Amino acid sequence: MSERMLTEILKDIETNEDMSTHLSPSWQQGRAAFGGLVASMAVTGMKKQLSDPKSLRSLLVNFVGPTPITPTNVVPRVLREGKSVTQMTADVADDSGIHLHASAAFGLPREAKFVPQASEFKPEPRESVPLMPKNMGSIPNFLKHFDIHWTGGGIPLSGMEDRRCGMWVKHTEDMSAYPEERIVALADMPPPIMLSHFKKLVRVSSLSWSLEFVRPPEEVTSEWMYLDYTLEAAANGYSQQDGRIFDEDGNLCAISRQCMVYFE
């Protein structure tokens, strides 16, 4: 199977009447496709149903099951289209069933009071940090589609029991035509920080994920994004991981929250 870039996959959804596409093995993460990719596919399908352009304001994702690299379809549905906000859902599915279910709110800007981010944030310079931790073990296939500078913490299978992970990330391809999908895919990049609490491989999987945009994605021009993620808690095989996504100047662009499961 030939290599497929993210822009090619999303272009299929835009142009095919049934919103069908297929992936390539380079997007695999274990037995499933990279979740950030599949979520971005759902966003493209929902955008296609908008009668007028609106900014993506929030995204909620349920990872129902592993998404294969075989042909899949995006099935969007408009729940309500108001003057300012459109609420939508989308399923990524094939003949075997639904693999991902997403809901999103797209909204126009309003004249309203501005409150700046809670505190100034200065990301660590990229030049001072390693490209990738050397003790990470096997590297998932999909990482070849991204440039990564790891600032430390949360390194899988290190046994360091970290609570935080930080990294600089950008796509290896030009994603300027897909500003929403660019950030959605990047925001799912950090591995479960819970993996840093183990020295041997354990099974982990995302259960649900929410992503809220502080700035409209189309206004974020920074190619590199800084991801600052924290493990809030873990018990009974479930972990909660929060994250903040910044541009190169330290401006807060999006907020992430993810529930993950781990199997010892």
Image: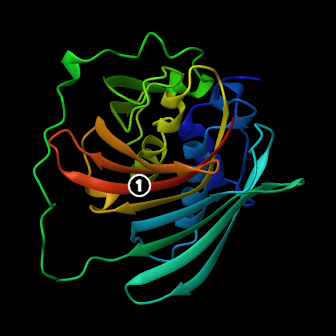
Q: Is residue 16 left or right of residue 71?
A: left
Residue 166, above or below 53: above
The residue lying at 29 percent from left, 38 percent from top is 226
Task: Please give the residue where the numbered disc 1 appears in the rendered image.
Answer: 256
The residue sitting at the bottom extreme is 83
The image position of residue 139, as x and y in percent, is: 57, 18
In depth, the one of 121 and 214 nearer the eye is: 121
The image position of residue 115, as x and y in percent, is: 13, 71
Which image quarter is the C terminus in? top right
The residue lying at 74 percent from left, 45 percent from top is 67
Residue 260, above or below 29: below
- Answer few, some or many: residues within 10 Å of disc 1's Cα (few below 14, many 20 plus, some between 14 and 19): many
The residue sitting at the right extreme is 95
Residue 224, above or below 56: above
The image position of residue 55, as x and y in percent, is: 37, 67
Q: In this view, does 234 lie to the left or right of 228?
A: right
Q: Is residue 152 left or right of residue 202?
A: left
In depth, the one of 140 and 184 nearer the eye is: 140
Q: Is residue 12 among what the camera can see?
A: yes
Coloring scheme of the render? rainbow
Q: Is residue 192 among what the camera can see?
A: no
The residue lying at 53 percent from left, 64 percent from top is 60
The image position of residue 232, as x and y in percent, is: 41, 51
- Asked which quadrant contains residue 76, the reply is bottom right
- Asked which quadrant contains residue 222, the reply is top left
The residue lying at 27 percent from left, 61 percent from top is 215
The residue sitting at the top extreme is 134
In depth, the one of 6 and 91 nearer the eye is: 91
Which image quarter is the N terminus in? top right
Secondary element under disc 1, as helix, strand or loop, is strand
Residue type beneath disc 1: Ser
